[in-house]
Amino acid sequence: MVPANSADPAADILEQVGNLVRTIDQKAKIPKAMGRKLLNDETAKVMANKDCIQCYMEIPIADPYRVQQEFYNLNNRIASCLAQNQEYIKRLAIEGKK
């Protein structure tokens, strides 16, 4: 949200997003993933081991109007990856219960 009297609402929103991203980047440290790589490219990574499945996606905000679309695209790719590796994930779950 920006003030109603803002001279350039789009610039204000971009500044707020930039501040949010900097705050998240400073606070969040992505833990080192251990296990088998199910998906590994520049924008999405999925790792699985007997304890957990780690999903990581990176969305550039150079074009703020495409952020939501990129999120949906990467989310679909990760969901597809998990569906393709369903049998492996089941074996990991069984192995983790032992």
Image (cartoon, rainbow, N blue to C red):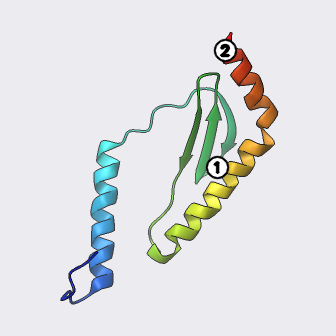
At x 68% / y 43%, what residue is drawn?
39
At x 33% / y 74%, what residue is drawn?
14
Task: Judge left or right: residue 36 versus residue 86.
Answer: left
Residue 90 x, y percent position in the rendering: 76, 28
Residue 55 x, y percent position in the rendering: 57, 42
What kind of element bears circle 2?
Answer: helix
Which numbered disc flags the more N-terminal residue, 1 or 2? 1
Task: Judge left or right: residue 10 versus residue 30.
Answer: left
Task: Judge left or right: residue 37 versus residue 6.
Answer: right
Q: Is residue 47 above or below residue 59?
A: above
Residue 77 x, y percent position in the rendering: 69, 54
Instruction: Name the quarter where the N terminus is drawn.
Output: bottom left
At x 58% / y 54%, what residue is drawn?
43
Residue type pointed to by label 2: Lys
Q: How far apart are marks 1 and 2 (CA)?
A: 30 Å
Q: In this view, does 88 lie above or below 20?
A: above
Q: How crowded is mark 2: few (under 14 residues within 10 Å), some or many (20 or more)?
A: few
Judging by the rendered image, the residue that carries numbered circle 2 is 97
Task: Judge left or right: residue 88 versus residue 30.
Answer: right
Judging by the rendered image, the residue that carries numbered circle 1 is 41
Would you identify the image quadrant in which residue 9 lies? bottom left
Q: How crowded is mark 1: few (under 14 residues within 10 Å), some or many (20 or more)?
A: few
Look at discs 1 and 2 and give the one toward the viewer.
2
At x 34% / y 49%, what residue is drawn?
25
- Foreground pick, 80 / 98: 98
What kind of element bears circle 1?
Answer: loop
Residue occupying the far top of the picture: 98
Q: In this view, does 89 lie above or below 71?
A: above
Residue 97 x, y percent position in the rendering: 66, 14
Residue type pointed to by label 1: Asp
Instruction: Name the quarter where the C terminus is drawn.
Output: top right
